[in-house]
Amino acid sequence: MMKSASTWMPGLKHNDDMTTSKKIYFPGLNFFRFVAASLVVLVHTEEIKGLHAFHNVYKNYPTELIGRLAVIFFFVLSGFLISYLLFAEKTQNKSISI
């Protein structure tokens, strides 16, 4: 039998209102998603500046590495959230509604 998600995920919050479905929310992860997405936008902006012959920092290895790691982190985090929500829905409803 599976434990309640809030017992093994300390930052997890959900809506206990019985009239609506329970909403699972990870308050700390929104910040990390925002930072990763912002870094991706920043690196893409620098790359576009380079295409138009403006000075950019994208050609520096650390900037390129930060951009690549931010993309990987964003997709891993998004994959975790989507998978977690699907497994929670399957546990609660015995099926997944897409």
Image (cartoon, rainbow, N blue to C red):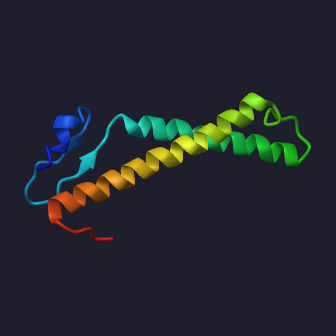
**Could you tell me if residue 37 is visible in this image?**
no
Query: Could you tell whether 15 is left or right of 57 in the image?
Result: left
Q: Residue 54 at x, y = what percent?
A: 88, 40
Q: Residue 35 at x, y = what percent?
A: 53, 35
Q: Quadrant of residue 57?
A: top right
Instruction: Residue at 87% x, 35% y: name it.
Output: 55
Above/below status of 44 relative to 31 = below
Q: Residue 88 at x, y = what percent?
A: 24, 54
Instruction: Residue at 77% x, 40% y: name it.
Output: 46
Q: Quadrant of residue 30?
A: top left
Above/below status of 32 relative to 14 = above
Q: In the displayed image of the protein, which residue is found farthest to the front?
A: 1
**Could you tell me if residue 89 is visible in this image?**
yes
- Looking at the figure, which quarter contains the C terminus? bottom left
Query: Could you tell whether 48 is left or right of 27 in the image?
Result: right
Please tell me which residue lies in front, 59 or 7.
7
Instruction: Residue at 38% x, 55% y: name it.
Output: 82
Q: Residue 5 at x, y = what percent?
A: 19, 43
Please tell me which residue lies in front, 20 or 8.
8
Query: Could you tell whether 28 is left or right of 1 in the image?
Result: right
